[in-house]
Amino acid sequence: MEKNKKKINFILIIAGIFLLIGLTHIELLGSLWNSLWTLLLPIVIGFVLAFILNVPVTGFENLFAKLTKNAKKKPKQQTIHIISMVLSIVCVLLVLTLLFTLVIPELVRTVRTLSEYVKENWPRFIAFLEQQNIDTTKINEYLAGFDFEGAIKKIMEGAGTVLGSVASAASTTASTIFSSVIGIIIAIYVLSGRDTLIRQAKKVLYAYLKPERADRVCYVGELARDSFAKFLSGQCLEAIILGILIFISFTIFGLPYAPLLGVVTAICALIPYVGAFISCALGVLLALLESPQKAVICLIVYLAVQFIETQFIYPYVVGGSVGLSPLWTLIAVLIGGNLFGLMGMIFFIPVVSVIYTLVKEDTDKRLEIKKKEMKKQV
């Protein structure tokens, strides 16, 4: 006991010394942190990419396992793993190609022609409002002094400036290119040697930690992997189904931009809760430029598709993929969005799921212990 106290006091003294040095040399500490982060950034990127790509790789491996279940001569596990890794990378490249060659150019074209649509169809919208006995005097006065072309031009210039600055920064900063390329290479190596790395990590854990602590770390790691895999696969599947439903529904009802809004809806569906409102607002806005009646039909179609998908498809196809209730999912989205923006909204749900599961298990364990103690007292 005395030995443990001395050890704890020694650790506290050393930590206090380092804290004092850090506070008195804050600029040097910041410089060292920047240098360390620049050094570690490719490794962090590589492991994050490998963690994300491991989800489709595992999915392809499970698919091949089912297809070759009754085969007389089964392929080697390493061969299946390499094929699954290649197919996952190809799928990611295809999705990025689709995004940059179809979706983004179509959105740019839509924004450029937005001014023409507004000027052409706005009188019909005003006439519709007047038919409903709505006073449009203030609206007409506001529109008379509003420069649609100038507003659209500013939006396009602003978007172009932002995209241009990002692209310029990415293309001119050698360290960014180096970090990204090295990160991708590290991700490929991590995926190809996944089983070996897991085995080595477990050896280190059990060599330096007590068995129960090592078991706990392994359990948390597996829980995080499973939660993220279920969330990512569930959200992607839901996004694809929702995008197809929107495309079919818009085509049937003759609504504009069915292919574009189908893809946009699929992409926005990856953002829980918020994504559905974004895609719906965009669809209604584009339909409103055609006619107010089509905007109303678009809104009804969106609500109907969302209702069908939520009530009949999501529970069976996705279900409680991360084991969180809608309340906790919404809380995770709000906290993640405020802390880390869009990426936080997407990836904070599996993090909260892991925390929720661990707290729930610890709570149940403590309650069970208290119940046993109460029975002994009785």
Image (tube, rainbow, N blue to C red):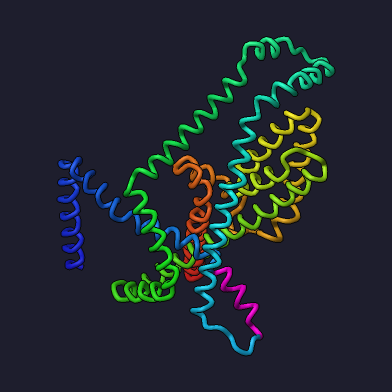
Relative to 355, say whether 190 is above or below. Answer: below
For this view, does 31 lie left or right of residue 248? left
Can see residue 1?
yes
- Asked whether 65 falls inside the magenta stretch, the response is yes
Residue at the bottom extreme, as displayed:
72
Instruction: Identify which residue, 366 or 114, lies in the foreground.
Output: 114
Instruction: Identify which residue, 349 or 179, lies in the foreground.
Output: 179
Relative to 150, say whether 245 is above or below. Answer: below
Measured from the top left, where is residue 242 in percent x and y? Answer: 70, 51
Span colored in magenta? 58-70
Q: Residue at x 70, y 57 (%)?
A: 315
Measured from the top left, where is residue 208 in percent x and y? Answer: 28, 72
Relative to 354, say whether 78 is above or below. Answer: below
Q: Residue at x 16, y 54 (%)?
A: 13
Measured from the top left, where is residue 304 in percent x and y? Answer: 78, 44
Q: Residue at x 45, y 36 (%)?
A: 164
Instruction: Identify which residue, 96 or 33, lies in the foreground.
Output: 96
Instruction: Identify which residue, 52 or 346, lies in the foreground.
Output: 52
Measured from the top left, where is residue 107 in percent x and y? Answer: 61, 38
Relative to 279, say whether 135 is above or below. Answer: above
**Rendering quarter of residue 172:** top left
Magenta segment, principal secondary structure? helix
- Asked whether 122 falls inside the magenta stretch, the response is no
Q: Residue at x 69, y 14 (%)?
A: 139
Residue at the right extreme, as displayed:
131
Quadrant containing the N terminus is bottom left
Can see residue 47?
no
